Image: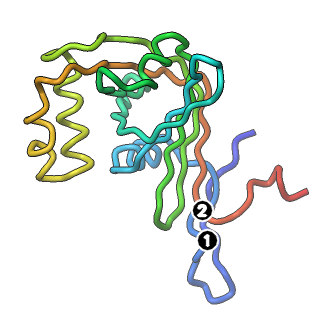
Amino acid sequence: MVTAAVEQKDETGEGWRGKIGLMDRQEMDEFLAAGNLARLAVLDDNEWPYVQPVWYQWEPTEGVFWIVARKRSAWAAFMQRDGRVALTIDGETRPYRKVALQGQAEVIEEPNTGGKWVEIAKQMATRYLGEHGPDYIVPTLDKPRWLFKITPTSLVTWQGVDWHSRYKD
């Protein structure tokens, strides 16, 4: 069921709840272009959930997420072994928004220096750290990193301060 987003007004007319409902594609793309952390869930070697906050790069034209991992990141090895993952991304300030998905992770590059991951990591560093992004990333470009592509198999968005109608009955 698709629910349209509507602006909710309280009795003062201030609309403190924000726009309620699913985000449209433009709203989602704009939200995912902001500097919110993602929480990546993978399955560890014992098939237990392992959750790690990560930077991500959303590629709206392909509808995929890029994740860059350091060579020794335990979760990267877990993701290489079993590509079933989940991501949640939520805004920490109002208007509250979130994107939650399950997807399939694919290894695009095993740990290397100078691969496709470099440009993606530079874009992420600038998005997350602003003008000092290059100050962070450039000195570590000699450190090998993985590049993963996550293709969503299911994706849900939500915005505003209210319950979805399925929870109200």
Residue type at mark 2 is: Gly
Q: Callout 2: 10 Å neighbours few (<14), some, many (20+)?
A: many
Residue 67 percent across, percent down from the top left: 36, 28
Residue under the point 65% across and 51% down: 4
Residue under the point 54% across and 49% down: 98
**Residue that numbered label 2 is attached to:** 160
Residue 107 percent across, percent down from the top left: 39, 11
Quadrant for the N terminus, please: top right
Q: Distance between the residues labelled 1 and 2?
A: 6 Å
Residue 72 percent across, percent down from the top left: 33, 22
Q: Callout 1: 10 Å neighbours few (<14), some, many (20+)?
A: some
Q: Is mark 2 on a helix, strand or loop?
A: loop
Which residue is most to the right?
169
> Disc number at residue 17?
1
On screen, residue 168 versus residue 112, left or right, reads right
Residue 16 percent across, percent down from the top left: 58, 77
Quadrant for the C terminus, please: bottom right
> Disc number at residue 144?
none
On screen, residue 133 versus residue 85, left or right, reads left
Q: What element carries label 1?
A: loop
Relative depth, front residue between 83 and 91: 83
- Indicate which disc, 1 or 2, sits on the residue closer to the N terminus: 1
In this rendering, the count of numbered labels is 2
Which residue is most to the bottom?
12
Relative depth, front residue between 109 and 165: 109
In this view, 112 is above or below 23: above
On screen, residue 28 versus residue 113, left or right, reads right
